Amino acid sequence: MAAPFDQNDDSVVVIIGSGAGGGTLGTDLARKGISTVILEAGKRTEMEDFVNNEWESFANISWLDPRTTSGSWRVAKDFPGLPAWIVKAVGGSTIHWAGASLRLQPHEFRALTTYGNVPGANLLDWPITLEELAPYYAKAEDRMGVTRTNGIAGLPGNNNYKVFAKGAEKVGYKDFSTGRMAINSAPRDGRGSCQQIGFCFQGCKSGAKWSTLYAEIPKGEDTGNLEVRPESQVLRIEHDASGKVTGVVYADASGTEQRQKARVVCVAGNSIESPRLLLNSASAMFPDGLANSSGQVGRNYMRHLTGSVYGVFDEPVHMYRGTTMAGIISDEVKHDPGRGFVGGYEMETLSLGVPFMAAFLDPGAWGREFSSAMDGYARMAGLWIVGEDMPQETNRITLHPTEKDRFGLPVPNVHFDDHPNDVAMRSHAFAAGRSVYEAVGATRTFPTPPYPSTHNLGTNRMSEKPRDGVVNKWGQTHDIANLFVSDGSQFTTGGAENPTLTIVALATRQADYIAEQMGKNAL
Amino acid sequence: METKTRPTLSRRDLLKTFGAATVVVAAGAIVHPGEGWALEATALPPETMRTLVRMARDTYPHDQLADRFYAVAMKSFETEAAGDPAFKAMVEDGVIALDTLANARHGVAYVDVGWEVDRVALLREIEAGGFFQKVRGTLVTGLYNNEEVWPIFGYQGESASLGGYLTRGFDDIAWL
């Protein structure tokens, strides 16, 4: 059913990665009649392969290729080989994501204009506005079945949400609900409704949660125009003497090098692998890596200001029952510099099982202070903070000078230091989260440091001027017309919202642009 | 947990245990007469395994958990030591150093230091070292990823095969 394309077919669009960006783009291009090959580094596992077991699932689907870390962030100390918690499989991190689907706010597209010159931050306005992206947000919400849009009912609140909502109400917050989630509250688009299984991070076994794995890619394949090649890790992108890209070299499942020719190449490997690939594709013509005339490839790495607050109560909560991210408080997402920082943050419920709670509540901690917290597991409620972190040029993905992967390529190093604005916002958010739980009688609360990054953003950022970033408003690289970036690494700034909806909206918009440009023979 | 192993345990061994509510050393194994289990210890001396199990409880003390959960969690040390001489040496050296410290502070080996607070103080002295960190890191998964302990913490685990929690209490909170 899926079209197999010849490796020498130089008319195809090659997309690297099959997650929110690549999977959506590939499906859209295929529907437009464009021959498309998605090369996915991971395996193709299906819904029935997912397991409701945190560590087993982690071993099955995570991106565990060697990476190194540096900088003052605590992840570099606690999880030095695991800067990011993302997925290596067909579907990418849409297998793992929690489903929160939020539009960026208008002012977040104009971060430099709104926040002004923040020392140490490399702020920039996006070259697009919310108005331009709004029609694509609407399409994305419809295709993903986002609750509280398109007449779709919200999900019911679970125990973790009920504690959170009651606390929000008592604190005086107004803007809280079970949120806009790409999880079916009723059967839709051939997928059933949420069974409140929990384990959203381990892959949704009912298919109620949107994922490119089963909600997009099969539709693309049904057109006969999309071929997905799993276990195909792209090693470098090649170009001709004119500087246009001509195809990619990848390692197949056996590690053998293969070459796929291409008319257009779209990079969607998430914000660590995408810049790494551009840097590893350096050539005599592009000695600093592809699309890197600005020197911005790999820079401005953002991970959202995160952190968790867990509250322990004197009565049972059983927070793990039902959707992992079951509700949201948006009162603090506004930009109000009177709080001592620019930008804002969301609070979203989050739960971990006993195995991950032990690993992440306070990594490295031991003794009764820690074990007594674990004793309160069944009486615990939890939330996650998602805030806008500042882009900094020095927070970046670089190629490790000595460490190589199994293909002999330098591994990526992820360097991150918090900006003072990040520290101030996290401190405010920790206190806000504690207030929510104390308002409903928490007897103990914990600030939990950021987990390995799930929202990896900004390392090939979008800019109006070529000197400020890597891609233009269409995700097309400033330097090479037929080379695109199609994932969250395009983000000029991070906003305070979970990024998947924006990645999908940008991919849909990019598909229109690529089709139009191909139609005009401009690509 | 090697329940098939039936090491010889003399009456005198048992008498040494002050009522058997603790882990004792036997030939090629550690034994918990009170809980009725034995864990083979051949790659590492049984004395070393006993110290590791005591360390495990002192590191992540849960009074509601039986010793067997800590023994199971530390079993991987025995397995790893069997195939890795450097690891075996690291563990044995670590225990010797801990016992030396215990002797200096209290005049007895670590397992014989009578009060948890005193043993924990000894662990605090070695917590930055590789040996302690290996024990602690092993416990994070060895103890908390054991499905048998989950119900004790009130965690129900896998739910998809049971239809999720939609009709099994996802929103049953009653005290708010």
Image (cartoon, rainbow, N blue to C red):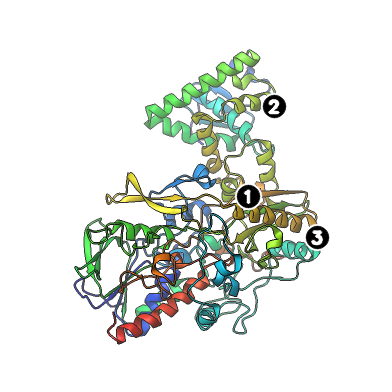
Q: Chain of mark 1?
A: A
Front residue of this view, candidates B25 and B49: B49
Q: Is residue B63 left or right of residue A28?
A: right
Residue projecting furthest to the bottom: A520
Circle 1 Cα neighbour tier, 10 Å, few/some/many (<14 / 14–19 / ≥20): some
Do circles 2 and 1 both sit on a common chain? no
Q: Which residue is mark 2?
A: B117
Is residue B42 at all visible to an observer of this figure?
Answer: no
Above-or-below relation of B23 to A119: above
Q: Which residue is mark 3?
A: B175
Q: Which mark is residue A285?
A: none
Q: CA distance from mark 3 to mark 1?
A: 26 Å
Please name the residue shown 43% across and 61% down the image. Answer: A459
Q: Chain of mark 3?
A: B
Q: Is residue A339 left or right of residue A456?
A: right
The image shows residue A308 at horizontal and vertical percentages of 63, 54
Q: What amino acid does circle 2 point to?
A: Val
Q: Which mark is residue A448?
A: 1
The image shows residue B115 at horizontal and vertical percentages of 70, 24
Q: Is residue A135 left or right of residue B88?
A: right
Please name the residue shown 46% across and 75% down the image. Answer: A506
Query: For the residues carrying marks 3 and 2, which lies nearer the camera in this image?
Result: 2
Q: What amino acid does circle 3 point to?
A: Trp
* Local secondary structure at mark 2: helix
Q: Chain of mark 2?
A: B
Is residue A438 at all visible to an observer of this figure?
Answer: yes
Front residue of this view, candidates A68 and B12: A68
Could you tell which of marks 3 and 2 lies nearer the N-terminus? Answer: 2
Q: Is residue A485 left or right of residue A257?
A: right
